[in-house]
Image: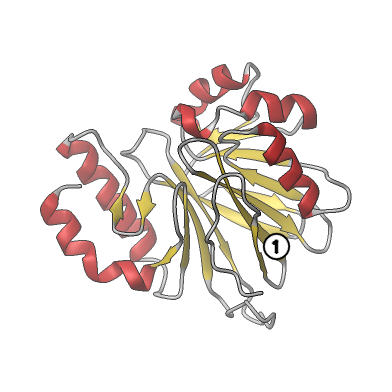
Amino acid sequence: MTYSGDVRPGGPSDVRVLDEVEIRKASVGPMDNNAYLVTCRRTGAQLLVDAAADPERLLALVREGAASARLDGIVTTHRHPDHLSALASVVAVTGAPLLAGAPDADAVAAAADRPVQRRLQDGDTIAVGHAVLEVIALRGHTPGSIALVYREPEHADEADAVAGRAHLFTGDSLFPGGVGATGNDRARFDQLFLDVTERIFDRFDDTAWVYPGHGPDTTLGAERPQLDAWRARGW
């Protein structure tokens, strides 16, 4: 079945199989939060992006990803409560290390009641078995908001793979139709818009796939024509 990214709370996950990794998307909780599980196909290593809500569903998602059901890390894209309300429960069961953007790490640690092992900065990398994800800081929605990018290898030949395509997990910083909320603060919006423009749209081509923190997926090609309109409206 072709991946669509169309998921609903309480429903099944959607799965995308690429050369090196599988990406599983599930929706959890009353705010329809997206959680993503990235699994290395060679080693079974797994990374959960946003333990947002419903720990039982998230633990089931981990078991879907690999026979070992091991979780090697949990990344929190930003410190807002709807993106980490299941974090304490999931880490208590799995013992997985916590990773978060440095400016948001104290809040994430408080929510999880344990330290954040890696305080991420722009340009850091995260190994998931043989796959590598890069950290992109996107300041504005919160000071420590981050995105993760996985690039398909140039030789990608799986059915759902495109050689060299970027896969971007953007949290609440980039959605279909705009950047994340910045509280009607023009300075915060300007910072987020600048980061999204320079660190995402200027770096990656139109094939880049966007996996946001809520709702449906999109591509940079679908969103790029709207950048001037986003800047003009200020949200």
Determine whether 223 is above or below 231 in the image: below
In the rendered view, how is the structure colored? secondary structure
In the visual, does 3 lie left or right of 83? right
In the visual, does 106 lie left or right of 47? left
Q: Residues within 10 Å of mark 1 (few under 14, many from 20)?
A: some
In the visual, does 198 lie left or right of 29? left
> What secondary structure is found at the residue carrying circle 1?
strand
Kindly give the residue lying farthest to the front in the view shown.
10
Residue 131 or 216: which is nearer the viewer? 216
Residue at the image position 55 percent from the left and 55 percent from the top: 7
Q: Position of residue 152 (x, y in %)?
A: 61, 71
Determine whether 127 is above or below 141 in the image: below
Q: Position of residue 98 (x, y in %)?
A: 65, 32
Q: Position of residue 140 (x, y in %)?
A: 31, 39
Image quadrant where one finds the N terminus:
bottom right
Residue type at the position of mark 1: Glu
Q: Position of residue 99 (x, y in %)?
A: 60, 35
Q: Quadrant of residue 23?
A: bottom right
Residue at the image position 50 percent from the left and 40 percent from the top: 77
In the visual, does 199 lie left or right of 154? left
Label 1 belongs to which residue? 22
Residue at the image position 73 percent from the left and 56 percent from the top: 39
Residue at the image position 88 percent from the left and 52 percent from the top: 67
Q: Quadrant of residue 225?
A: bottom left
Looking at the image, can residue 174 be seen? Answer: yes
